[in-house]
Image (cartoon, helix red, strand yellow):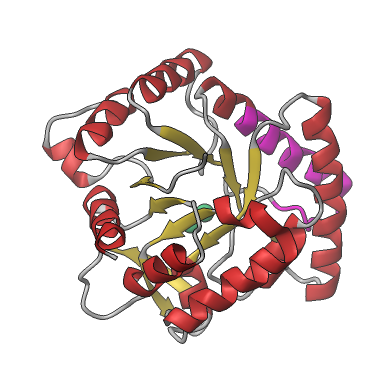
Amino acid sequence: MEEIKFGPSGNSKWFYDLGYKTSLQAPKWLSSLGLNAYEYSFGRGYTMGEEKAKQLGEQATENNVTISVHAPYFINFANESDEMVEKSYNYVLTGLKMLKLMNGKHLVFHPASQGKLTRERALELTRQRLKILAKKVYENGFEDMFLCPETMGKTLQIGTYKEIVDLCTIDKIFVPTFDFGHIYSLNLGNFGSYEDYKEVFTYALEKLGERAKSCHIHFSQIQFGAKGEIKHLDFGNGEYGPYFEPLARVIKELDLTPTIICESHSNMTKDALYMKEIYEKI
Ligand SMILES: [Zn+2]
Ligand SMILES: [Zn+2]
């Protein structure tokens, strides 16, 4: 039986203020706070060794914390060059190998950038490449994990919520990452009501069925400009949203069991706890 999970992306300021030094200490600490998810980012590349990944996995299992990983930002499945796209496949496959060592289930990735292509062409390329990627995932025996393309915050990135859900129809190994801060900034702040959240999940449930219930979620408040996302902020910044309360109501009402990762600027652990509290009060 799936259950809803809350946790931070990476180590917060609080973690270091308490004197903790390495991510291996994170699962036990998070568990003591009542959190049960932790996202490890390989955004800038794979710098962690396999031995450490395994140790982190052991810590996570021991403390009932589910690990997810974020694949490198360099991935681009809409690159016209097949040779360049090979690198993107490998970034995902390496990420799955690390995720498996960490006993985790979800790998988050940014699918593509439109660049100079038309939106249509970029989407078509991305779709073709994700089909090939799915094949490689099965060939490598990684199909027990989920690949989670993320909704993006800038206009030239592939990743509106509909694009992401549609890409996830390719195969059951794909599950959306709904980054609601990104959706909010892409819509220049015109997103975040109960109805808005409900519309996203209604669409996802219609296209993906039950699989959409255990989706991955990123949540943070984000500063935006004309082209979308500028900067992740902490809760209580006073100026930018979105807000978690209406989302919590939709999650309860639709009986969803997502993993909710807080991507606040530096208070991600406190903000994850705050979201959990809001959810439990409903
Ligand atoms: Zn991301
Ligand atoms: Zn995100």
What residue lies at 43% left-to-right and 83% top-to-bottom?
189
What residue lies at 81% left-to-right and 53% top-to-bottom?
170
The answer to whether residue 26 is above or below residue 162 is above
Q: Nearer the viewer, residue 48 or 274?
A: 274
> Where is residue 202 shown, x and y percent of the image?
62, 72
3 falls in the magenta region: no
Q: Nearer the viewer, residue 208 or 183?
A: 208
> Where is residue 6 shown, x and y percent of the image?
36, 47
Q: Which quadrant holds the C terminus?
A: bottom left
Specify whether 36 is left or right of 73: left
Res. 81 in view: yes
The answer to whether residue 141 is above or below residue 207 is above
The answer to whether residue 70 is above or below residue 254 is above
Res. 225 in view: no
Specify whether 150 is left or right of 137: left
The part of the image, by quadrant, that contains residue 134 is: top right
> Where is residue 173 shown, x and y percent of the image?
72, 43
Q: Residue furthest left?
A: 18
> Where is residue 183 shown, x and y percent of the image?
52, 72
Query: Magenta residues: mostly which secondary structure?
Result: helix
> What span is colored magenta in the figure?
76-96
The part of the image, by quadrant, that contains residue 93 is: top right
